[in-house]
Image: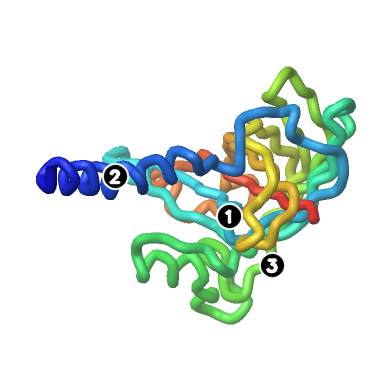
């Protein structure tokens, strides 16, 4: 009897955490019905812009921008009227190479010269939407991208990722998230150093989280 009791106790000890884990639910769900109308604020800690270039034809090379700030205004019943206005701090660019990161933000070698990439203390980039064409849970979002003092139209392919209420320990509120892809030519933004050894085309992959309290 004692052996059976110990075996049962051991089974319960193992099963209890599994049952508790199964009872927990991820707060965000891929359910567009959970999205409510209003103005959302970008979550800077969970919004990232990944950029990828071809490096010498051998490998793709990528880095990221974080700390995205701005707003998203949307109404699920009228998605074509949605508006997004976000800024991306170019000065906080991150790569796996300390030397490359420093080069991206290096000042011109000579007074009055042109930086190879962004230069010291670059202005924030900004994307402001001008048109949204929605189809189900995807959309093509066109807007004006300001980068390195140049403004050009850019179209992003956006997909709804999830929505729901954020945990209270993370501040609570309603949250919605998206993924987006697109591309630009860096030469059009006066960042032409190294072309064609480092590709002119820059592929963009974006994850954007927005919060409404």
Element on which disc 1 rests: helix
The way the protein has been coloured in the rendering is rainbow
Element on which disc 3 rests: loop
Q: Please identify the quarter of the rendering in which residue 125 is found.
A: bottom right
Instruction: Report, in whole angstroms, how far the alpha carbon at label 3 lies from the one at label 2.
Output: 59 Å
In the rendered view, tell whether residue 23 sits above or below residue 32. below
In front of the other: label 1 or label 2? Answer: 2
Image quadrant where one finds the C terminus: bottom right
Instruction: Report, in whole angstroms, how far the alpha carbon at label 3 lies from the one at label 1.
Output: 21 Å
Nearer to the camera, 10 or 181: 10
In front of the other: label 3 or label 2? Answer: 2
- The residue tagged 2 is 12
Graded by Cα atoms within 10 Å as few (under 14), some (14 to 19) or many (20 or more), the crowding at tag 2 reads few
Question: Does residue 176 show up?
Answer: yes
Q: Residue furthest left?
A: 3
Q: Tags 1 and 2 in contact by the CB under 8 Å rule?
A: no
Q: Please identify the quarter of the rendering in which residue 98 is found.
A: bottom left
Graded by Cα atoms within 10 Å as few (under 14), some (14 to 19) or many (20 or more), the crowding at tag 1 reads some
Nearer to the camera, 154 or 178: 178
- The residue tagged 3 is 123
For image coordinates 50% across by 47% down, the residue present is 51
Question: Does residue 126 show up?
Answer: no
- Residue 184 position in % (x across, y down): 60, 40
Residue 47 lies left or right of residue 56; in this view the side is right
| Lower position in the chain sequence, tag 3 or tag 1 | 1
Graded by Cα atoms within 10 Å as few (under 14), some (14 to 19) or many (20 or more), the crowding at tag 3 reads some
Nearer to the camera, 132 or 54: 132
- The residue tagged 1 is 46
């Amino acid at each position: 009897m004692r052996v059976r009791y110990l075996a049962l106790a051991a089974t319960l000890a193992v099963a209890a955490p599994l049952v508790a884990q199964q009872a927990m639910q991820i707060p965000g769900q891929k359910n567009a019905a959970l999205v409510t109308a209003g103005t959302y604020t970008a979550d800077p800690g969970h919004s990232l812009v990944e950029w990828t270039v071809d490096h010498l034809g051998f490998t793709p090379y990528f880095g990221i921008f974080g700390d995205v700030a701005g707003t998203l205004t949307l109404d699920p019943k009228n998605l074509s009227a949605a508006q997004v206005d976000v800024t991306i701090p170019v000065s906080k660019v991150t790569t796996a190479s300390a030397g490359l990161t420093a080069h991206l933000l290096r000042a011109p070698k000579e007074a009055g010269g042109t930086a190879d990439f962004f230069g010291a203390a670059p202005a924030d980039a900004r994307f402001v939407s001008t048109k949204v064409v929605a189809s189900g849970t995807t959309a093509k979002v066109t807007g004006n991208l300001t980068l390195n003092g140049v403004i050009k139209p850019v179209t992003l392919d956006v997909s709804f990722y999830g929505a729901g209420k954020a945990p209270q320990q993370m501040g609570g509120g309603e949250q919605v998230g998206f993924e987006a892809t697109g591309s630009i030519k860096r030469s059009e933004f006066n960042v032409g150093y190294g072309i064609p050894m480092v590709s002119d085309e820059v592929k963009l992959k974006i994850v954007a989280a927005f919060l409404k309290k």
